[in-house]
Image (spheres, grey):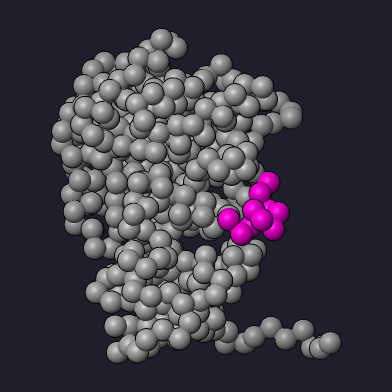
Amino acid sequence: MKKYINAVVYGHDDANEILVDNGLIKGIGKNLGPADEIIDLEGKLVTAPYVDPHLHLDYVYTLSEMGRDGAGSGTLFEAIEMWPKFKENLTVDSVKKLAIKGIYDEVSKGVQHIRTHVDVTDPKFTGLKAMLELKEELKDKVEIQIVAFPQQGMYTYKGGRDLVEEALKMGADVVGGIPHYEPAREFGEQSVKDIVELALKYEKLIDVHCDETDDTHSRFVELLNALVLMEGYGEKTTASHTCSFGSADNSYAYRMIDLFKKSKINFVSCPTENAYLQGRQDTYPKRRGLTRVKEFMENNINVAFAQDSINDPWYPMGNGNMMNVLDNGIHLAQIMSPEEIEKDLDLISYNGARCLNIQDRYGLDVGKDDNFIVLNGDSPFDVIRNRAEVLASIRKGEYLFKQKPVDYDVKLDLGVKY
Ligand code: FE2
C-alpha cells in the first residue's frame, strides 16, 4: 500500500489523501488506513491524467522535415494538397522516429492517453504499421488509440473506403472519415454511411473529421448523429472539429443540440488548430473557427479539447501542452464563469476519456487505475490561471516523471513590502 497525503483531490472536496495498491486506487478521503510508503504532495492539486483525444502522430514534425517554418496560406485544403508528395517517401522507421518526439512532448507534460488519427489512404499502410508498433512498444507509458483515417478521402482517393476497412482488420481501433473533403455532398454522405456500417461490422469506435470548414452548408454531423442515434451508437461516436456548426443558424443549432443530447454523441474541438485554420476566407469580422463548445457544456453534451497537430503542414506550432490548448480554448469559447472554470479541466481530461470510451477505468475514483498527475497549484482556478506545469505523472504506481517547481538562483525582489 502507498498513500499520497496533503493533496487537493480534483472532484473530491472533502479528501486530502489517496491510497493505492497494485495499480489501483483503493481509497480517497481523509485519515485513510496505514501504508508502507507515504508521499507528501504538499498541498498540490491532483487530477486524472491529461487525455489528448485527437492528434496526428504520423504527421508530427513533418513541416520542419519539409524545410518549412510556416505553412503557406494556412488553409486546411492547401495542407491536404501538400501532404501526398511528402508521404511518398515515408518509411515505418522514419514515421516512428518523428512520432516518438510528439509522444514525448505530450507524455512529458502529463498526457497518458492519446487518440491518434493515422492516414490510411496509402496502400502500403506505412503510418499505420509504425503506429501499431509504437502502440505496443509504449503501452506501459501511454495508451494509444488508433483511428483509421482516410486523409485524402474515401472517394476523393480511389479505393479509400476499402483501405479504411483493411486498416480496421490490421488492428486500428476507430473508424475515421473526412466527409467535407469528398468531391460532392453525396459522396460525403456515402462516406458517413460507410463509417457507421464499418464500425458496426467490426465493433469499432467512430471518430470523424466532420465539417472542418466555415461553410454552413457542410452539415455531415447531422447525418452522422442521425445514424448513430438510430443504432444506439452515440456514446461510441465522436464528431471532431464540427467548425461549421459554430457558424450555423441558431434555429438549426437549437434543433441539432436536442438531437445530440438524445444520441449522446461526443465532440472534440481543437481550439489552437481551428483558430489558425478557419476564417481564412473571411474579411472582418473573422470567425473563431470553433464549434459551439459553450453550448455543448451547458447542455451536458460531452466535448473535449485536443492538440490535433504538432508542427505539420496543417499547423506550424503545437508542443503537446494540453494546458496551452485549454488556455486558448477557454478564451475562444468564453468559458470562464466560476461554474465553468470548475469544469474546464474536464475538457483536457475526463471529457476526452469519454470520447475514448475508457471511463470505466479512468479517473480519480476507488477501483480505477492508479494513474494521475500533480499540478503546480492548489485549485482548478489556480492551475488554469497560471497555466501550471505538471510536477509529476504517475502511472500504475510508478513515476513517469517528477520535477520540482522552478528554483531560482536569484529570486526577484521588488524591494518594498505591504
Ligand atoms: Fe485532425
- Answer with the quarter of the image where residue 243 lies: top right
Residue 77, given in percent of the width and then of the height, sits at: 47, 25
Please tell me whether residue 235 belongs to the stretch shown in magenta. Answer: no
Q: Image point 60% across, 36% down: which residue?
A: 292
Q: Image point 34% across, 54% down: which residue?
A: 360
Residue 348, given in percent of the width and then of the height, sits at: 49, 54
The quarter in which the C terminus is drawn is bottom right
The quarter in which the N terminus is drawn is bottom left
Q: Image point 72% across, 86% down: which residue?
A: 413
Residue 83, given in percent of the width and then of the height, sits at: 36, 31
Q: In this picture, is 275 found above or below 403?
A: above
Over which residues does the magenta segment extend?
334-343
Residue 207 in sight from this viewpoint:
no
Q: Magenta stretch: dominant SS?
A: helix
Whether residue 315 sits left or right of residue 115 in the image: it is: right
Whether residue 195 sits left or right of residue 50 in the image: it is: left
Residue 355 in sight from this viewpoint:
yes
Q: In this picture, is 252 found above or below 384?
A: above
